[in-house]
Image (cartoon, rainbow, N blue to C red):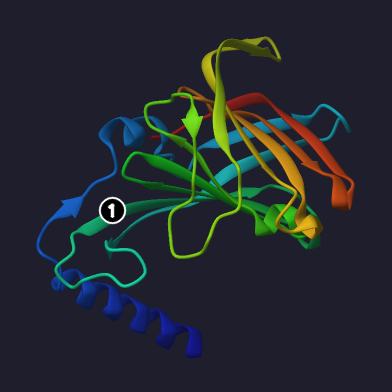
Amino acid sequence: MKNITLSLLTIILIFSACKKNNGTIVPVDAGLKSSFNYKPGSYWIYKDSLSGATDSVYVVANTIEYYLAGGCVPSKNAPQIESISILLSFAKSNLSDSEQWHFRMEGDKFYLSMYNNADKVESRAGFHLFTWPLAIGPSQNSGCVLNFDSGSVTDIIPQVSMSGQTYNNAARSAHSQSTHDTSMAYNDCFYVNQAAGIIKVVFDHPTLSVHRVLELQRYHIVR
């Protein structure tokens, strides 16, 4: 009952905030939305090239929210920002070793945050993967919390071949943090393709001895 009450209160606050803006809505970029707005029914199957383990990840929910722009203290006259959130879950049978990915799109930016009960470093990291259209350049998370991630799109690879498939123009988004908090040092890479989404992930977390390389085997996307 408490959870229901909190949910209703959240909805009321959201609608109240929407009524106070200046009537302007900043939408998610049309090209970004058409390429990466995954709906339930979408799934990707990955194989860890180091361990040989195979797992699937599927879209659990796709929601659109609006909030007032303006940073940490938004003005009531600020425009509304459209935010698309996509929750994905791995189909692991052991729930105590659960893993989830959360995509978020705002404007021309695509963000990723994760939860993995077996990897605390992964669960504490959040990335701005790329800005649309895919191009080489630095990435920085938005919001009130300082971001110490040194991420950037370092390469646009003309062709990446895996499991008998070839993906064109894959953006390599590299992220690392080892100086601010040595307890969560990481050196991760995400390879993004417009047609297939995330086609390869390299997790390198030396403080926890976590090393995984997920390579896409097959996929099905509903947009």
Residue lying farthest front?
179
In this rendering, would 9 be left or right of 92?
left
Q: Could you classify mark 1 by the number of other residues whose Cα lies within 10 Å: few (under 14), some (14-19), or many (20 or more)?
A: many
Q: Height in image: 93 above or below 169?
A: below
Residue 60: x %, y % from top left? 52, 52
**Tag 1 secondary structure:** strand
Front residue of 60 and 135: 135
Q: Height in image: 88 above or below 38?
A: below
Q: Height in image: 4 above or below 162?
A: below
> Which residue is pictured at 14% across the width and 73% down the height?
20
Q: Is residue 136 visible?
A: yes
> Which residue is pictured at 75% across the width and 49% down the height?
178
Residue lying farthest left?
23
In this rendering, would 55 be left or right of 11?
right
In this rendering, would 2 be left or right of 214?
left
> In the rendered structure, which amino acid carries the disc numbered 1?
Glu
Q: Quadrant of the C terminus?
A: top left
Residue 134: x %, y % from top left? 43, 25
Residue 143: x %, y % from top left? 43, 60
Q: Is residue 1 visible?
A: no
Front residue of 99 and 172: 172
The residue under label 1 is: 82
- The image quarter containing residue 12 is bottom left
Front residue of 117 and 220: 117
